[in-house]
Image (cartoon, helix red, strand yellow):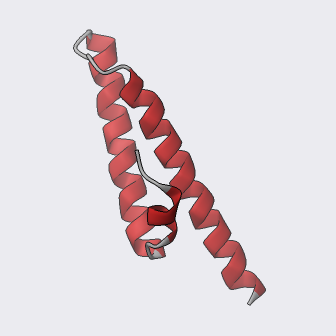
Amino acid sequence: MTKIADVRAKSPDELKTMLLDLRKEQFNLRFQRATGQLEAVSRIKLVRRDIARVKTVLGQQAQSTTKA
């Protein structure tokens, strides 16, 4: 799980890379769940929350650059 302060400290390019990695992990977790190989089911929820955090911070950064 990623802390929000860690996410806010990253640049937009780093956040986009992080978002891509999280989406790949989410896909792999869904695939494992579908094939019955997933053991840590709670990891799906954590990845979804991390994706939401990154998207929220990206949106906030985009808003702050348009206002300035």
Q: Residue at x 37, y 47 (%)?
A: 22
Q: Quadrant of residue 62?
A: bottom right
Extreme residue toward the left, this view: 37
Give the residue displayed 30% in from the left and 23% down from the top. 31
> Which image quarter: residue 58?
bottom right
How many marks do you count on the picture?
0
Q: Is residue 36 above or below residue 63?
A: above
Q: Which one is in front, 16 or 7? A: 7
Query: What quarter of the picture does the C terminus occupy?
Result: bottom right
Residue 61, how many percent across, how many down? 62, 73
Q: Where is residue 25? Give x, y as percent.
A: 32, 39
Query: Which residue is the extreme one toward the top?
Result: 36
Q: State the quadrant of the N terminus.
A: top left
Q: Is residue 55 above or below residue 61?
A: above
Q: Is residue 68 above or below residue 22?
A: below
Residue sitting at x 77%, y 84%: 67
Q: Residue furthest right?
A: 67
Q: Name the residue furthest bottom.
A: 68
Q: Is 22 situated left or right of 52 in this image?
A: left
In x, y percent, where is residue 57?
59, 63
